[in-house]
Image (cartoon, rainbow, N blue to C red):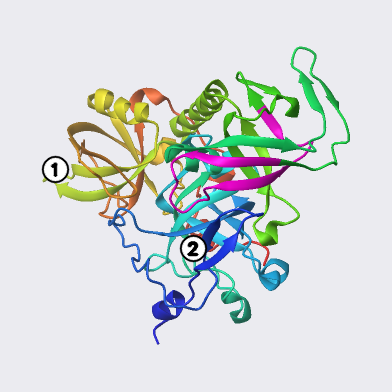
């Protein structure tokens, strides 16, 4: 049996219930996988609608190399919950992250947030990026450990048109917030209450739908009118978005509510704040894509055709389309999207073409740009990653730990190193 086939032999499709709620699927069996056979290749985006769905609590993060670890959601297996390994993952270079309904980076997501993701087997040549777990624990997690998308509950359900209607609130500690003074009035915050909800709209694919009961306590944040409020604001009939986190019954697919957004104003406020954080990050780190082709010219330069990766705020793509003739900086990047010294190592070119692709594949923005370069760097090769800068974004040196400074650092970053 080939190594690839061995990896595929571990799949989960166990039906479990959530705290008295509906059923959901999850990977923890040895049956032959049916849904996923695509292995990412350089310069090739995955087919639309593919990827193995997994969900779990974010417990560890390497935001610089776009990697982390999830505690997979419960499936009733005491052995896996008590002794199972962390599910470590790496973001594919074109993998997207969303938080509060807007594009995000792993550094934006609080530890403890329940995330929904779609994953593939490791790309060719990157099988050792995530070190294998001991054989006796390999059956407890899925072999698909390279993510094409990660989303919190807010983003995952809102994107699919699903929300939650509050049916009842029981036993919640009194917890009110005076915004003007910043004082908090609460009862015994250790008391755990129950929030009974039913899905509204949707239904979402792969997530949970139907009636559920979640825990709430004094640490649950409630947002209304764009501001923080207290648990007293919870009323039957409200339509809300939730973010879930660990609860003592996690093994049995039970969750606590970390955040509740009770109205559109609060949801829009959270989304706009995250969108601004995202744009700030991209202006300093630049937009990522990969080289589709290189047309060499006799004078030593050439034309680069580059496809932007998807998932960015639309305004960023528009800047390149509208301002590209002024000049675009192109820096070589690795699969982690880390650059070396991009404010010095980049070369400038001029946009000479812009194409928009209808129905782009998963991971692609659908935007391809052609840039005339007077000088070509060795890293400008088909299938290689680059980051691109509009000329008027300014020149900023990234912190030392974010830059790759030597070949040894690049090689060390190629393999994830976290506690077992």
- Residue at 21%, 43% (x, y): give it: 304
Quadrant containing the C terminus in the rendered view = bottom right
Query: Label for residue 145?
Result: 2
Q: Residue at x 27, y 28 (%)?
A: 327
Q: Is 133 left or right of 117, judged from the image as shown?
A: right
User: In the rendered view of the protein, which quadrant contains the N terminus?
Assistant: bottom left
Residues 317 and 336: in front is 317
Left or right relative to 417: residue 287: left
Residue 361: horizontal and vertical position, in percent? 28, 49
Residue 122 versus residue 93 in the image, above or below = below
Q: Is residue 63 visible?
A: no
Foreground mark, 1 or 2? 2
**Which residue is disc 1 drawn over?**
299
Is residue 381 shown in magenta?
A: no
Position of residue 107 relative to residue 8, above or below, is: above
Region of the chain picked out in magenta, as a range: 195-222
Disc 1 from disc 2: Cα separation: 44 Å
Whole-percent x, y for residue 282 in the image: 45, 33
Task: Give the residue drawn at x 79%, y 23%.
Answer: 176
User: In what element is the residue under mark 1?
Assistant: loop
């Amino acid at each position: 049996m080939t190594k690839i086939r061995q990896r595929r032999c571990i799949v989960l499709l166990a039906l479990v219930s959530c705290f008295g709620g509906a059923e959901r699927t999850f990977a923890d069996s040895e049956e032959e996988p049916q849904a996923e056979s695509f292995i990412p290749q350089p310069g090739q985006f995955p087919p639309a609608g593919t990827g193995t769905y997994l969900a779990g609590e974010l417990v560890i993060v390497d935001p610089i190399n776009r990697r982390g670890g999830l505690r997979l959601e419960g499936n009733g297996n005491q052995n896996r919950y008590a002794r199972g390994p962390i599910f470590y993952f790496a973001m594919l270079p074109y993998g997207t992250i969303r938080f509060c309904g807007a594009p995000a980076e792993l550094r934006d997501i609080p530890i403890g947030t329940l995330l929904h993701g779609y994953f593939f087997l490791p790309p060719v040549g990157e099988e050792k990026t995530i070190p294998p777990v001991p054989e006796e624990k390999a059956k407890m997690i899925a072999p698909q450990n390279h993510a094409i998308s990660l989303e919190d509950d807010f983003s995952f359900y809102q994107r699919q048109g699903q929300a939650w209607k509050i049916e009842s609130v029981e036993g919640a500690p009194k917890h009110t917030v005076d915004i003007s003074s910043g004082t908090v009035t609460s009862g015994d915050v250790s008391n755990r209450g129950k929030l009974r909800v039913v899905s509204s709209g949707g239904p979402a694919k792969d997530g949970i739908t139907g009636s559920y009961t979640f825990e709430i306590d004094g640490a649950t944040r409630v947002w209304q009118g764009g501001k923080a409020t207290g648990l007293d604001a919870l009323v039957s009939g409200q339509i809300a978005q939730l973010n879930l986190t660990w609860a003592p019954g996690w093994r049995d697919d039970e969750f606590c509510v970390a955040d509740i957004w009770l109205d559109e104003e609060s949801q829009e406020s959270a989304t706009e704040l995250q969108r601004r954080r995202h744009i700030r990050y991209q202006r300093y780190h630049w937009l990522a894509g990969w080289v589709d082709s290189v047309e060499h010219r006799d004078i030593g330069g050439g034309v680069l055709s580059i496809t932007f990766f998807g998932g960015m705020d639309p305004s960023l793509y528009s800047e390149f389309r509208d301002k590209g003739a002024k000049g675009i900086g192109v820096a070589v990047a690795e699969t982690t999207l880390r650059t070396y010294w991009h404010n010095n190592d980049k070369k400038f070119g001029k946009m000479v073409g812009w194409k928009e692709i209808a129905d782009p594949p998963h991971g692609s923005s659908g935007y391809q740009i052609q840039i005339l370069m007077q000088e070509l760097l060795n890293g400008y090769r088909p299938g290689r990653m680059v980051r691109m800068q509009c000329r008027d974004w300014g020149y900023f040196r990234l912190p030392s730990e974010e830059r790759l400074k030597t070949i040894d650092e690049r090689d060390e970053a190629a393999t994830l190193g976290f506690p077992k």
